[in-house]
Amino acid sequence: MSRESVLINDVGPRDGLQNQSKILTVAERVALIKALADAGMRYIETGAFVSPRAVPAMAGSDDVATTLGQLPGVTLSALIPNARGYELARAAGVNTVAMVLYASEGMAQRNVKMSMAEAEAATCDILARASAEGVEVIATVAVAYECPFDGQTDPAVARDIAARFLEQGASRIVFADTIGAANPQQVRQLLDPLVAEVGAERLGAHFHDTRAMGVANVFAAIESGLRYFDASIAGLGGCPFAPGATGNVATEDVVMMLEQMGFDTGIDLDALIAASDLAEELTGSAPGGRSKRWLKPWLQKQAAS
Amino acid sequence: MSRESVLINDVGPRDGLQNQSKILTVAERVALIKALADAGMRYIETGAFVSPRAVPAMAGSDDVATTLGQLPGVTLSALIPNARGYELARAAGVNTVAMVLYASEGMAQRNVKMSMAEAEAATCDILARASAEGVEVIATVAVAYECPFDGQTDPAVARDIAARFLEQGASRIVFADTIGAANPQQVRQLLDPLVAEVGAERLGAHFHDTRAMGVANVFAAIESGLRYFDASIAGLGGCPFAPGATGNVATEDVVMMLEQMGFDTGIDLDALIAASDLAEELTGSAPGGRSKRWLKPWLQKQAAS
C-alpha cells in the first residue's frame, strides 16, 4: 500500500536562525541546509533578502543561494519583503520566493509600516511579476490566529486574504500561528471551511510550540486535510514579539509523528537527527526537538538489530 | 453560554511520584494533593496499596488517605493491585479504587505474573465486591496502544476488555498509553468505534509525552468525544520499562489547552501553577509542564492589568 505524502518545509535556516542569538557564517548556513537536503527534506527556506542592518543573521543570503545553486529534488526558497528583495533574490538565482501577508492591522503596521490593504497590494504586484517570470510564490498569512497587538484574528479575514491570493496565482498559502497562540480547535475552525471551498492542495500551516500545542496543531491541520507544514530543525526560532516564546515546532517532532501515523515525508530519520545535532552544535542555543531524547536511542537500537 | 466540562484526574501523587527518584514524606504528599485540590482538581489519585518493598515511594498510602479524609468536591482514589490492596484501601477510608487491566500478555506477565485472562478474572472479582459495597471503580487498560514486550496492541483487544468491564459495573475505563508510544491517529482509531458503541461518558484517556505527542493525543481523544483525562502535575512520572521516557503528559499543558479551546476544567490556572511549582520543589526532578514558561508570565501580566 503506498503511503500518502506530506511535505515539510524546513524554515530553520531562515525563520529559525534569524531568531537565535548567535549569527552563523554563510558556510555554516550552507552546511545546515545541505544536511537537511541530505535527510530528504523537499522544501527548505534558505534565507531572506532583507536589510542586513535590520536582520544581521540573514546577511549574505545571496551568497547562501549562489553557493547552493540547485539541489536535486529540493525546492529552495527565500523570503522577500518587497520588490527590491525580489530582484536581489532573482539575481542570486532563487526560483521560489516566500512572501508575507498580514491578517491584522497591528502586525502590518509594526512589520512593514503599511495597512493590511497596502501590504496586500504591494505583495500582489510582486506576485504578478513572479507569475509572469515563472517564479513560484509561497505566501504566508502572518498572525492567522492571534496578533500580539490586535488580539484574536477573525478567521474569515485570514481565509479571505488566502482565497484572494490563491486566485491571483500564488502556489501555496501557509497560515502562520506567528506567536504560538493557536489551539487545535481554532486550527480546525480556521481551516475546515477553506478546505471545503478551495481544497487542501495549495494550503499549508506553520506553528510554534510556545504554549506546548505545536504538535497538536499539526495533527489538527492534518485532520482538516492539510499535507504541507513548515517546521524548524531542532526547534530553532522564536518570535521577537512573544515573550517566553519557544521556537517553531521542531521538524523532528513533526516528522516522527507523521511517519508514525503512516504518512510518507520522504525524510530519513537518522539523517534528520544528524541535521538537528548540527543545528544545536552550530547555534549553541537550539531548543532541540523534544522527541529526540526518545528517537535517538530508538534509532540506535534499530540499527544494531 | 455555558462551557462544556472536561474532568482531569491528576495522577501525579501516584503514577508520577512512584517514578521519581526522590521519595517524598507522607506530609509532602498530602501537601501536594491539597495544593491540587485547592486548584479545583476534581479527581486525584492519592497513592497505591502495593508492597512498600516493590514500590517504596508509595509506602504510607494509608496514612496519606486517612490524613486527607474526604475533600469536598474531589474524588480521591487509590490504586489497588489485588484483593489485599482493596481491603487495605477500604480500611483507610478509600471510596474510589483504581485497578489495572492488561491489553497484552507480556505486560500482564511482567507486572502481575498472570495471563491477561487470569488478571481480568481477578480484577472482576474485586469489581463485584466493590459494586456490592458501593465503592467506585476506575479501571485502566494498560498498554492499550503498544506494549514494550509484545509490540503493537490490537485495538479490538483493548476495546473488548473495556466493554466487558463496563458491563460488569466499572464506573470508568481509562485507556493508557503506558509507554508513550501512541500517535493521535491511533488514538482516534482505538476510541472512535468504542464511543460509537457505548458512548464517551464512562471512558477516559491517559497519555505520556515520551515522543512529544502527549498533548496531540489528548486533542485526538477530545475529537473522539472523550471528556476525562489523566494528567500529572509538572509532568511527574515516566515508565520503568520505557528507556528515555519523559513523564505523563503535564496537567498544566492539558488544562491550558482545554481552557483555551473553551472547555471548563474547573481549575484555576494560578493555583495550578503553584501546585506545579510545589511538585518541582518537592521532587527536585519534575520535568515541569512545557506550557509553564509561557503561562507564568502571562498570568502575572493578567493579574497586573
Image (cartoon, coloured by chain):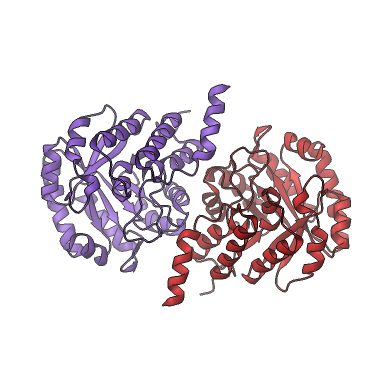
Chain colours: A purple, B red
Residue plotted at (68% across, 45% down) = B159
| Side of A111 relative to B1 (left or right) | left
Could you tell me if residue A138 is visible in this image?
A: no
Residue A301: image quadrant is top right
> How far across and down, in percent of the image, does residue B77 sit?
75, 60
Residue plotted at (88% across, 60% down) = B132
> How far across and down, in percent of the image, does residue A171 sit?
24, 43
User: How many tags in the picture?
Assistant: 0
Residue plotted at (18% across, 49% down) = A52
Residue B289: image quadrant is bottom right
> How far across and down, in percent of the image, does residue A234 sit?
41, 42
In the image, B65 versus A56, the foreground residue is A56
| Side of B124 relative to A20 (left or right) | right
| Side of A69 relative to B61 (left or right) | left
Could you tell me which quadrant the C terminus of chain B lies in?
bottom left
> How far across and down, in percent of the image, does residue B262 sit?
50, 66
Residue plotted at (66% across, 43% down) = B239
| Side of B8 relative to A5 (left or right) | right
